[in-house]
């Protein structure tokens, strides 16, 4: 099968007709087909050198999910497992997210999941302003391509980056409408791993997200 015109190959050493974008995991090369505008974003993210985080990464981590998604979930940055696998929310926080999405009746395959910053900060520290600024255009492109009705903000970094707001604990669970998009403010699932008392609130937010998706 011949590739689409906007299928990209940026890291594969063998530029064959399939033209895959490949992810290096240890000594292995994992080939992935990426088509369309989201594939183009993923291809550029995979070789991005806009900030110093590129120097220590194993893999950059673009978002995943269908272009037809009615909701985008936006976290902070990749962690260790995400850096190794090149996919967002596949570590401990991802397991929490998967469980609560399933509990709320939201198949992960129906939403788009991404982060503000696409490379792992050292020791999982909070990304700097410079790192966020270097990466934010990718997130804006993802949102523009998908044009979702709902954006679920997961944590303080996403809240600040998308809406310019702080004080997430005071507005968690609220819906903010901006430019015809509903932003649901929630916690980062990693927070519930360190403070189990926050899990019920996060669970309520995911149920609210499910209701919002059904109503669109």
Image (cartoon, rainbow, N blue to C red):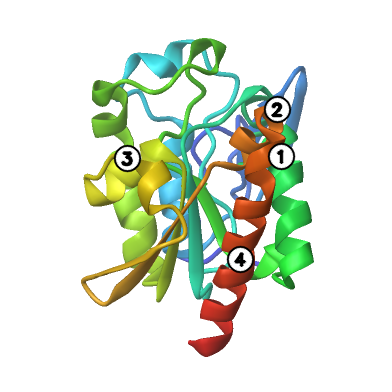
Q: Is residue 103 visible?
A: yes
Q: Nearer the viewer, residue 177 or 136?
A: 177
Query: Which quadrant is the N terminus positioned in?
Result: bottom right
Q: Which mark is residue 82?
A: none
Name the residue beneath numbered marker 1.
Answer: 90
In this rendering, position of residue 208 left or right of residue 80: left
Does residue 41 sit above or below 134 in this rendering?
below
- Taking the spot 47% from the left edge, 18% from the top edge, the residue there is 121
The Cα–Cα distance between marks 2 and 1, rounded to whole angstroms, is 6 Å
Q: In the rendered structure, are the residues bearing label 2 and label 1 in contact, judged by CB atoms less than 8 Å apart?
A: yes
Q: Nearer the viewer, mark 1 or mark 3?
A: 3
Q: Position of residue 140 (x, y in %)?
A: 30, 53
Q: In the rendered structure, are the residues bearing label 1 and label 3 in contact, judged by CB atoms less than 8 Å apart?
A: no
Q: Is residue 91 visible?
A: no
Circle nearer the N terminus (4, 3) = 4
In this rendering, position of residue 6 left or right of residue 84: left
Does residue 62 sit above or below 78 in this rendering?
below
Name the residue beneath numbered marker 4.
Answer: 2
- Taking the spot 70% from the left edge, 32% from the top edge, the residue there is 193
Name the residue beneath numbered marker 2.
Answer: 81
Q: Nearer the viewer, mark 4 or mark 2?
A: 2
Circle nearer the N terminus (2, 3) = 2
Does residue 43 sit above or below 127 in this rendering?
below
- Return the residue found at the far bottom: 215
- Find residue 64 and report its image quarter: bottom right
- Find residue 190 and report its image quarter: top right
The Cα–Cα distance between marks 4 and 2, rounded to whole angstroms, is 33 Å
Q: In the rendered structure, are the residues bearing label 1 and label 4 in contact, judged by CB atoms less than 8 Å apart?
A: no
- Circle 3 SS class: loop
The Cα–Cα distance between marks 1 and 4, rounded to whole angstroms, is 31 Å
The Cα–Cα distance between marks 2 and 3, rounded to whole angstroms, is 28 Å
Q: Position of residue 89 (x, y in %)?
A: 65, 41
């Amino acid at each position: 099968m011949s590739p689409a015109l906007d299928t990209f190959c940026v890291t594969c050493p063998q530029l064959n007709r399939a033209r895959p974008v490949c992810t290096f995991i240890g000594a292995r090369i994992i080939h992935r087909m990426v088509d369309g505008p989201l594939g183009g974003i993923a291809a550029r993210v995979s070789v991005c050198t806009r900030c110093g985080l590129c120097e220590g990464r194993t893999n950059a981590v673009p978002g995943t999910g269908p272009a037809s998604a009615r909701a985008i979930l936006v976290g902070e940055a990749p962690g260790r497992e995400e850096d190794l696998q090149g996919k967002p929310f596949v570590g401990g926080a991802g397991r929490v997210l998967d469980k609560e999405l399933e509990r709320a009746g939201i198949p992960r395959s129906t939403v788009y999941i991404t982060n503000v910053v696409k490379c792992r900060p050292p020791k999982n520290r909070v990304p700097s302003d410079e790192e966020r600024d270097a990466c934010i255009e990718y997130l804006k492109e993802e949102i523009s391509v998908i044009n979702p009705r709902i954006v679920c903000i997961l944590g303080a970094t996403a809240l600040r980056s998308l809406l310019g707001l702080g004080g997430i604990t005071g507005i968690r669970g609220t819906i903010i409408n901006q430019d015809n998009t509903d932003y649901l403010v929630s916690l980062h699932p990693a927070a519930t791993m360190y403070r189990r008392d926050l899990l019920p609130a996060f669970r309520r937010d995911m149920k609210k997200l499910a209701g919002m998706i059904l109503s669109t």
